[in-house]
Image (spheres, helix red, strand yellow):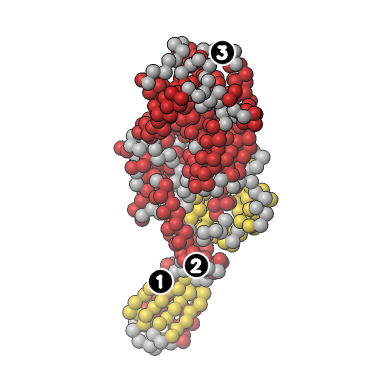
Amino acid sequence: MSAVEVRNLVKVYAGTVQALAGIDLQVEPGTVFALLGPNGAGKTTLMRILTTQLRPTSGEARVFGLDVVRRDGQVRKVISYVPQEMSVWTDISGFENLLIYAKIYGLSAKQRKAVIQEALESMALSGVAHNLVRTYSGGMVRRLEMACATLIHPKILFLDEPTIGLDPSARKVVWDKLVSFKRDYGATVFFNTHYMDEADLYSDQIAIINQGKIVKLGTAEELKRSVGGEVILFNLAGTEIGADVLDEIRQSRQVKDLLISNSELSVVADDAETALPGVAAILSRRGVPVKKISLNKPTLDDVFLKYAGTRLESGGRIGEVRSVRRMIGRG
Amino acid sequence: MIELEVRRMRHSGTEIIIRAVQPVLWLVVFGPIMGHLRAINTGGIPYVDFITPGILIQSSIFVAIFYGLTIVWERDSGILKKLLATPAPRYATVIGRSMASGVRAVFQGLVVIPIALIIGVSFVANPLYFIVAFLIIFFASGGFAALSIIIASFMKNRETFMGIGQAIILPLFFASNALYPTEIMPSVLRHIVTYNPLSYMVDAVRSLIITGDLHQLPIDILAIGVFDALMFGIAALTFKRIIE
C-alpha cells in the first residue's frame, strides 16, 4: 500500500483560481518525498488536501489507503502536519505546548509524560522546556513544532517548507532531527520546499510542481540525468589529439558524446564519475598530456529550468522574506 | 482547550489587571454619581449595587467578544491549520475554544468582586448563589465567544474585527438592563432588550448575587441555554470558512 496516492486531483478556489490542475503521484512508505516548486505552484494546497483541511474539487487522494474526504477522521489519526507558518502558542512554555497536543491526541497521563520527555530530548529542547516560547529562536520554534508533530509517532509526517526562514546551521539541525526520527520509527516524510539543496540532500523522491501540475518525478539523480548527461572537461596541455584517440574514447561504453574545441575536450556521459577513469586511462595510454580535469553536473536548478520553464530561486525570494517577517511580527 | 487558556492566563497576570481598570471606573465614578441623582428607580437597592452585576458581566463579555481575535491570530499563524489536522473533531475545537474563553471571562469578572466589596456593595451572603452566578457567566460568555468566532470567520483582518467588536459590545450593553431597569425604557428599546441575551445574563446574576430574588432565574437560564446552543451550532458551521 502506498503512503500517499493521488489521482487526477483538482482544486479550484472560489470557482476561478485553479490551484491544482490534475495531480497524480504516489509515495512509498518509509521514504522521504520532496515536492519542489516555486511559490504559488500549489504545494501548500496539495498538502492541505492531503491533511484533510481542504476538500478537493475533483479527483482522489488517499493516505495509507484512507480516502482524505470520506475517511478524514481516520486519516488525521495517522498523520502529523507542520504548517509553513509558526504553529505553537508563544505565550506558554514549550512543555505546555506539548502537553496540550498530547491531550488533544488523547494520550493517557502516563504515556504523556514519557512521550513529551522523549520528544523534548530528541529535538534537543529539554533545557528550555519550561521557558516561554516567545523567548525561543526561530530554529528552536521549528524544533518544538517538530516535537509536537512527532509526539504521536505518526505514520507520515507532512511538512510545509520545514526550514523556511532559518539560517543554514538551524536548517541542518532540523534536518538531522528529522532524518533520525525517520530512521528510528520508519515514518514517511512528505515535505514541500523551494530549497533545491534540501530536496537534493534529504529526499528519496522528488516531484517538481509548477502551476498546479507535476511536471517531473524521480530521484534527484534521475532528474539531473534527464536534463542531459554529465560533462567531463579535460584541459589538454597541447592542442594535438589524434582522430583515432577520439574514436577510441567515443567507443568506450559509458561515453555518449564528445566535443573538442581548442585545447578543451568535453566528454558527455550518463554518470561522469564512473566514466572518468576509463577515459583518463585512454588518454594516458595514448600519451595525451592533461593539465586539469573537471566535472560538470547539472543541478536541480537546471532540471527545474527545463521542466518548469523558470528558475526556482528568483521567484521565491520576496515571498520568503515576507513570510519570515510575518513570523517575526507575530512572535 | 480550557487548560490551554488557564495556562496562558497564568503567564499574563498584568493583562487581567489592566483590563480591570475600566469596570473599576464604572463602579467608582459612574455608579455613585448616577446614584446621587436618584433619577433611576432601582427597586429599593442602591444604584451602585444595581449596576455591579452589569459591570461585572460587561468585563466578562468584553473578553468573550474579543476572543475571536485569538482565533484570527491563530489562523494567520499556523495553529488553526495544525489543529484541523489533529484527530480532535472540529465542533469540539469550536466549543472547546468558546468555553475556554468562558474561563477567561470568569476570571475577568472575579476581579471586579473585591473592588465592589471595598466600595460597599452588599452581596447576597450565600456562596452557592455566587457559584451558580459564575457558572452562568461561564456558559453565557462561552456563547458570546462563539458569536465572536462566527464574526471572525467572516473577517479578513484584525482591524475590521476590532471595529465590529466595538460596534457590537456597546449596543449590547446599553440596550440591556445592565445600567437601568427596563421599565424606564421606551417601548421599542424594551423589545430589543427582550431579545438581548445579555439582559438574561445580567438578570440572572443580579438576582443571584444582589437581590436574592430567584423567580426569574429558570427563564434566564433557558434563554442563555438557547443562545449558547444557537451560537455553538452556527460557529461550528462557519468555522470551516475561516481556514479557506
Q: Position of residue A128 (x, y in %)?
A: 32, 38
Foreground residue, A27 or B66? B66
Going by the image, does B118 lie left or right of B220? left
Q: Residues within 10 Å of mark 3 (few under 14, many from 20)?
A: some
The chain that hosts pointer 1 is A
Location of the N terminus of chain A (image quadrant): top right
From the image, tell me which residue sits under label 1: A295
Q: Which mark is residue A311?
A: 2
Q: Residue at x 39, y 46 (%)?
A: A331
Image point 67% across, 40% down: which residue? A70
Kindly report the distance in space between the C-alpha atoms of the residues bearing marks 1 and 3.
90 Å
Residue B127 screen position, x and y as percent: 45, 12
Residue sitting nearer the eye, B227 or A118: B227
Q: Are marks 1 and 3 in contact (CB under 8 Å)?
A: no
Amino acid type assigned to the residue bearing label 1 in the image: Leu
Q: Which mark is residue B214?
A: 3
